[in-house]
Image (cartoon, rainbow, N blue to C red):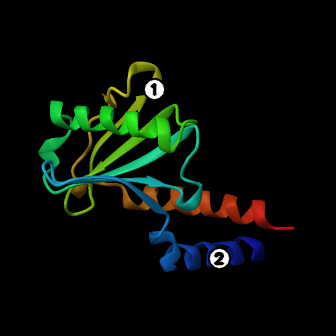
Amino acid sequence: MGTRIGAAALAASLVCTPAIAEEAHRLANSKTLGVEIDAMGGEGWCRQRLSLTVTAQNAGVYPTADFTDLIKKLGQVLETECPQARHADISGLNANNELAFEGSASASNGWVVAQSNEPISSSSSTDWGAMLSGWLNTILGWASALRP
């Protein structure tokens, strides 16, 4: 029991550190669409399966033809910047940093965006408790892996 409390304290301190906010690598910025695309993972962002966070000034950009074209162009850039990238999970945020879009793209389909089948619920129905619990479980798993 004491270990779980200690691990929870560690998890809380990790969530609150500024280093977490610096875990993104800027891949693209489109002033025309009003979007920024970041690869999560800090210095180790380049891997076979990417986690991309797209922040849009207007959530209506998801998933328009212009947005799809931008992701296709990003895929072409990835061929030289991160040749091992084969798949990208995409989380699209609105201007308030609320999840507005979820999808993916892969090299095998020419980096065409595929929206997830589940509709994004409004922020008023977000289950913050479940989300925080998921984050804490992930961090606790990391803490366990780091324990000698």
Q: Hey, which quadrant is residue 83 in on the image? A: top right
Q: Which residue: 56% across, 63% down? A: 136
Helix, strand or loop at label 1? It is helix
Task: Looking at the picture, tell me which residue is in the foreground, 59 or 32.
Answer: 32
Secondary structure category for the residue under label 2: helix
Q: Which mark is residue 120?
A: none
Dot 1 amino acid type: Ala
2 or 1: mark nearer the eye: 1
**Viewer-nearest residue: 100 or 19:** 19
The image quarter in which residue 73 lies: top left
Q: Is residue 113 above or below residue 10?
A: above
The residue that appears at 34% across and 31% down in the rendered structure is: 116
* Sequence order check, earlier mark of 2 and 1: 2
Q: CA distance from mark 2 to mark 1?
A: 38 Å
Q: Quadrant of the C terminus?
A: bottom right
Give the class, few, some or many, for how many residues have Cα within 10 Å of label 2's Cα (few <14, many ≥20): some
Q: Residue at x 60, y 57 (%)?
A: 138
Q: Which residue is mark 2?
A: 10
* Image location (x, y in percent) of residue 10: 65, 76
Q: What is the total number of numbered labels drawn onto the structure image?
A: 2
Closest to the observer, 128 or 38: 38
* 147 is higher (above) or lower (below) than 73: below
Q: Residue at x 71, y 78 (%)?
A: 6
Quadrant (top left/top right/bottom left/bottom right) for the N terminus? bottom right
CB contact under 8 Å: marks 2 and 1: no
State left or right for residue 103 relative to residue 8: left
Is residue 90 rendered to the left or right of residue 41? Answer: left
Q: Is residue 133 above or below residue 54?
A: below
Q: Please, what is the three-letter code of the amino acid marked with disc 2? A: Leu
Give residue 26's position: percent from left, percent from top. 39, 58
Q: Position of residue 127 (x, y in %)?
A: 36, 55
Question: What residue is disc 1 on?
Answer: 107
